[in-house]
Image (cartoon, rainbow, N blue to C red):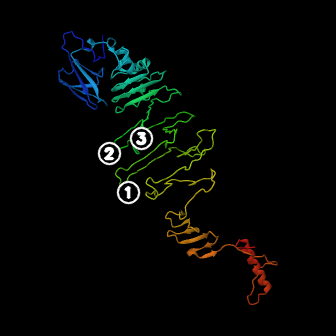
Amino acid sequence: MAASIWYPGTSIPSGGTIARAVEPQTIAAGQTLVNFLTFEYVPGSGDLFIFIDGFYFVDFAQTSSTSITLNASFSRAVELVAVAGIPINDGIGGDAVAFSAAGAGSVARTMQSKVREASMISIVDKGAEIGTDASTALQRAIDSGNQIFIPPGPWAATTAPTITDPTIIRSRLGATVTGAGFEALGLQAGISGIEQSVHLNTGSSDVASFYFRRQANHTGGTPGFVNACIRADTFVTNASATAFEWAIVGVMYNYANAGENVGGYFQGLKYSTGATWGATIEVKEMLATADPTTGTVGLEVDIRANGTDANTARVILDAVLGKQDTSGTAVTAAYGIRLQDAQGAGVNKVVRGFTTYNLTCDVGFDTSQGTINQASYKMAAGQAISFNADVSRKMYYDGSGLRFADASNTIIGRITDSGSFQTAGGVQVVGARNIGWTAMTGTTNKATVYDTATVTTAQLAGRVMAIQEALALHGLIGA
């Protein structure tokens, strides 16, 4: 009976004319070279068989009569059994080997049923061979189950398969796939240095293609130490390389005409009084040196598009406040966007809190679309608004008046709290309104030319009346 699986817990069958040798070993994580200590074999003769954790294994090279080299290492320790001198067709069938899980209450099963339950269907199981079109084998594998495995090696499939049920396609590290058949599955063609997994024919009720849950019911913890359900670490170790590495990438290919489709989504659900964040983004300069020559960016948000935006549909950064219970009371948030010092007020500094850099804006800061109850822009006394790039013309409240000043805070113009107007150097040119003036009667005269030597009292009175009316009109004097 043909067999591709041998259970190490059973004895090797005896008989035949070939001497048999069995050697078990524990292979450490990352190990690829396996040396045999109890036997030799003839490389290329077909009399050496390797089993990993009970599974028949072929992904290795016969390097010498006493060793083999695994084509890829394992991420954990595994149990290897080498069998020399037993042709595979003389082995034990999986349906003749019993399997019983550890612990009480286990039910005896055949090894074949156990392996089929836990394994994926390989395209090799369905007749795929390197160097030939694997389209038929790929379709057979998909028709036989919903978890398909593509082993290491160069594989080509020219015909796109038909898929009617939810299916997971896994291409192992070292597998290179090409052709319309594999590309139709969403696999990246021509790349062998990555593990690929594709979930096809998903439904609208599916939670996720992969779901992870961490049940954190412990107490205590250390600030700054992060416990995570999923963590991805990328180490860029070549200091002389120009690297473009991203630890996590989420790409949304959206061809829908409606709905909400998102490249990355984070959500924090606050059920108690513990502080909760939806997302935290942090970059640390581990060398802690001044004046870096390359970028240190905490968060970059981009839009790539073309043309105008007449419908105001493009928003680079959108901060939205809303009610959790839509029938409940309106929500209030203390801050929309907040810049703060991690070490306390006055320790660290941001040179420009808000900047438009190399960007054309019609309006730099606009609050006209909202309801502002107190002030659109609020500043403390002494904090200035600058009207040019070198801050040589600025305006600020100095504690008793609104000052328009130069870079050294010298007064160019000033309005005091009492309403007086001052010019350069603080010289008052207009004071508070002078009251107690009663309007004159008669005829004003401000146009006639008078000789001061011959002017009459009536003419002077008409001129004074004209001056009084002008001062009252401008609000400098009044009743």
Tell me the CA gap for discs 3 and 1.
Answer: 38 Å
| Quadrant holding the C terminus | bottom right
Mark 3 or mark 1, whichever is nearer to me: 3
Mark 2 or mark 3, whichever is nearer to me: 3
Tell me the CA gap for discs 2 and 1.
Answer: 22 Å
Secondary structure beneath dot 3 equals loop
Look at the image and tell me whether residue 284 can be seen.
yes
Residue under numbered circle 1:
291
Q: Position of residue 452 (x, y in %)?
A: 73, 88
Residue under numbered circle 3:
220
Q: Position of residue 394 (x, y in %)?
A: 54, 65
How many discs mark residues in the rendered view? Answer: 3
Look at the image and tell me whether residue 126 can be seen.
no
> Looking at the image, which is closer to me, 449 or 288?
288
Mark 2 or mark 1, whichever is nearer to me: 1
Q: Is residue 448 rendered to the left or right of residue 191?
A: right
Against 136, residue 309 (above or below) is below
The residue positioned farthest toward the right in the image shown: 442
Against 413, residue 322 (above or below) is above
Q: Earlier in the sequence, mark 2 or mark 1?
A: 2
